[in-house]
Amino acid sequence: MNKRNTLKMIAELSNAKGVSGFEDETVEIIRKYSEGLGTVKEDSLRNLYIYRKENSGSLPVVQLDAHSDEVGFMVQAIKPNGTLQIITLGSWVTSNIPAHKVWVRNAEGVYLPGIVASKPPHYMSEQEKKSALEMKQITVDVGATSKEEAMKEFKIRIGEPIIPCVDFEYNENFDLMIGKAFDNRLGCACALDTLKALSGTTLEVDLVAAIASQEEVGARGSIVTSRVVKPDLAIVFEGCPADDTCVDGYEIQTAIKKGPMLRHIDARMITNPRFQRFALDIAAKHDIAVQEAVRAGGSTNSAAIHVSNAGVPTIVIGIPVRYAHTHYGISAFYDYENGYRLAFEIIKALNKEIIQSF
């Protein structure tokens, strides 16, 4: 892995505007970085498939999964005063939404800057100050003074996507990445780096990276990708919520700078225990830092993939992201690198007999 090139790729992916259903820009960047890796196909949901050029067509199929979308918003209505009523795309907590800059796409495809707004504290009652915001109390302000101006001059229309406005940064001194959409552009980058690292390597499996759309609104894209790829085994890359700033020390299972997280369970999947132990043994053999987690909530594309077709042994390699599902995330490149290394070593060790044993 060339760290500088990988960071450049992660920066482009993180900065890309691609909320659920509007992943086009992200997909084009992934296409660019897929050049030379194999055959690339796309479907109407904006799922992208990269078939490794060395595939034989006769070996067990391993699917590398990541999702291209990010959480964001959509214009629901335009108010008489020119502000935009919005809905969420993906899971948000309302207290995390206001007072941030966003991009609003207009009818010409131009992204206009806006501010996520709520009633100023000067005009709030004491009760309002103490109460949680509801979504209908949150608007986006692009600077229009009327509905007519918003529509005619700013060319805003309903149904348009709204994306957090954040620029990727890497602090070399602390090996930290700060940016948006680490859930799950880090996973997209991991899938690409894994393909690159295995390019030209003789394997006993065929490999397909399927970059799925619309994960944040119900793992919709991966329902289709698993039907198309028909994998015998799957590795799901995810940018998973770090817990090291919000739970007691003994409960921490997804800390930054401790390696990727392999979950035994979440709200929608019990991880195949045989594949999970195989992955953990591979990590130990190659001295790859990993963390194990038992999640009471949350889910990933593994929810759809592991119950597809005749059932698919699936693991999740999660790169810890502090403050996932907000405008900003913090992740360590160390965790990213170990996630990619783990997938690389797992795939090299696989064969038909091992997969059938799961």
Image: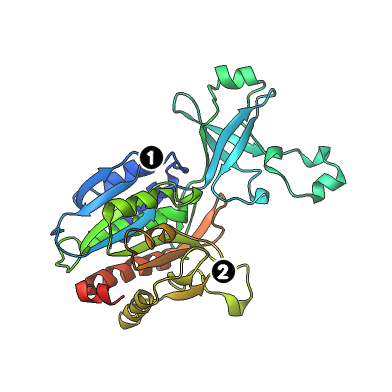
Q: The residue tagged with tag 1: helix, strand or loop?
A: helix
Do the numbered discs 2 and 1 sit on residues whose CB atoms are within 8 Å? no
Q: Nearer the viewer, residue 161 or 32?
A: 161
Name the one closer to the observer, 184 or 135. Answer: 135
What residue sits right under mark 1 in the picture?
25
Label 2 packing within 10 angstroms: few (<14), some (14-19), many (20+): few
The one of 1 and 196 positioned closer to us in this rendering: 196
Q: Residue at x 61, y 18 (%)?
A: 149
Residue at the image position 60 percent from the left and 22 percent from the top: 150
Hey, which quadrant is residue 358 in on the image? bottom left
The kind of residue tagged 2 is Ala
- Taking the image as shown, residue 203 lies to the left or right of residue 324, namely left
Q: Nearer the viewer, residue 282 or 310?
A: 310
Residue with the mark numbered 2: 296
**Helix, strand or loop for disc 2:** loop
Mark 2 to mark 1: distance in Å?
33 Å
Q: Position of residue 46 (x, y in %)?
A: 35, 42
> Residue pushed farthest right?
126
Where residue 286 appears, x then y in whole percent? 30, 79
